[in-house]
Amino acid sequence: MTLLKIARMGHPVLLKTAEEIADPTSRDIGRLLEDMVETMEDATGVGLAAPQVYEGKRVIIFKSPRERGEEDAADSDFSPLTALINPEFEPLDDELAMGWEGCLSIPGMTGAVPRYSRIVYRGYAPNGQAVEREATNFHARVVQHEIDHLDGVLFPMRMTDLSMLTFNEELKNFMEYAMEQNAGGTGWQSRRGRRMTDVDDGIDTALRDRLIVATLAHTPFDGWSQAALRAGARDIDIAEDVAQAAFPHGTRDVIRHFSRWADRCMVAGLEAADLEDMRIRDRVAIAGELRLEALEPHKEAVRRGLSWLAMPQNAVLGARLLYRTVDDIWYAVGDRSADFSFYTKRGLLAGVVGSTTLFWLDDDSEGGTETSDFLDRRIADVMRISSVRRRTEDLKMKTPNPLRILRDVARKRYGGQALRGGSHSG
């Protein structure tokens, strides 16, 4: 057996349609399969298609092993190491599920891809015997991914939102922060599912809220600056030194509190709503609309705030604020998960919140109806995450990149100038 070189995205072989195999039992196909297995295992993958090793043949291998704790799951979710020649599939229904995928031909990246949750696939085994089997969830996802390779399709070409395509290394820092937040209890929910609150530093939150609301009237002219804060304090007869003490780190503290103020407005609205008989997806949609409703009179302040957060030196704060927002939403709508889905749900919703905010900034439709429709479509894409299998090692599942979302907002509204000020350009 031989380790084969894996073609990377950009090579023409990955964009061509592979050829049918006339004789599945041929010696050449047997040798190719042996080498593909060796190559896949060496690369710690869960699937490999012949075009990925520069062979334009309709041959794939894959596996979906049963993990500990999954003994009660359906057999169709799993598969031993399987080789299929001339494979094809058809969906058993129209249900699509959003899930995270990586690819040996696109090293270092991951993206959220919609796939059919239930399929039946057919093909031939290396001994020439016909194969037909139902596959669900992760098993179905892997098969669809590998058959795509035979038709010259890479997973980013299936994505409906490229803001959810990101580098693994970028997301590693965000995931570590999320785990740190919940392990340390600085967020709403610890890893054991216990609700937490913001740290109390002895300063009245209501005072800060009053200052934020007053400052918002000046941000369209002065930006998120000390001048805007001083002007806001004068408007409500608060001494300048008191305002400075409320936000000792200046713009950083003011923007942080503005984001948390919007989150609290959203949570208060959810607590007043009758959510008991609503689906989770409807609760999440209401949460998103309530937050945008609180921000509606302050669009220019949001634009300027996102531009500031998108600067390289401020991007970590932007990621943290986005994480806190989606964490608040999930907790407020009743989610109490404490397993890996805790992070998957927050990661998926981060993409929704970020892209919806970007859309909302330019929406001039009456009553924001276009934003509401956009939000509904985005939530419909990602709310089937319960069917996404937890395969963090095999497919390097990660959360979407909040830093990319913030950069996209700033680039669209302000161009390259919004990102100047750091030593790196992106």
Image: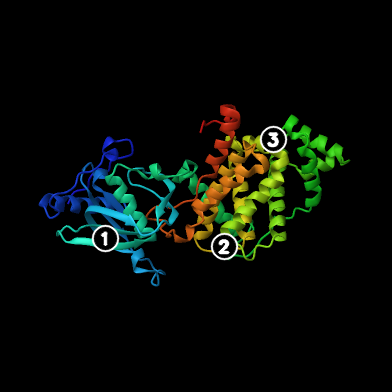
Name, please, the residue furthest toward the bottom. 72
Amino acid type, residue under disc 2 in the picture: Arg
Helix, strand or loop status at disc 2: loop
Q: Amino acid at mark 3?
A: Glu
Sequence order check, earlier mark of 1 and 2: 1
Q: Residue furthest left?
A: 27
Crowding at dot 1, Cα within 10 Å, few <14 / some 14-19 / many 20+, comes out as few
Q: Earlier in the sequence, mark 2 or mark 3?
A: 2
Looking at the image, tell me whether mark 1 or mark 3 is earlier in sequence order: 1
| Residue 191: image tag | 2
- Residue neighbourhood size for the residue with mark 2, other residues' Cα within 10 Å, grouped as few (<14), some (14–19), many (≥20): many
Q: Is the residue 417 above or below the residue 387 in the image?
A: above
Residue, far front: 366
**How crowded is the residue under tag 3: few (<14 C-alpha within 10 Å), some, or many (20+)?**
some
Asked if disc 2 and disc 3 are in contact, CB closer than 8 Å, the reply is no
Figure quadrant of residue 15:
top left
Spot occupied by residue 116 in the image (x, y as percentages of width and height) = 39, 55
The answer to whether marks 1 and 2 mark residues whose Cβ atoms lie closer than 8 Å is no
Alpha carbon distance from label 1 to label 3: 55 Å
Secondary-structure class at tag 1:
strand
| Residue behind mark 1 | 81
From this viewpoint, is residue 199 visible? no
The location of residue 12, given as percent across then percent down, is: 28, 35
Query: The residue under label 1 is which amino acid type?
Result: Leu
Do labels 1 and 3 touch, CB within 8 Å?
A: no
Residue under the image location 42 percent in, 69 percent down: 69
Viewer-nearest of discs 1 and 3: 3
Residue 402 visible in image: yes
> On screen, 205 above or below 241?
below
Q: What is the secondary structure assignment of the residue under circle 3? A: helix
Q: CA distance from mark 2 to mark 3?
A: 36 Å
> Residue 248 placed where, x, y %?
75, 42
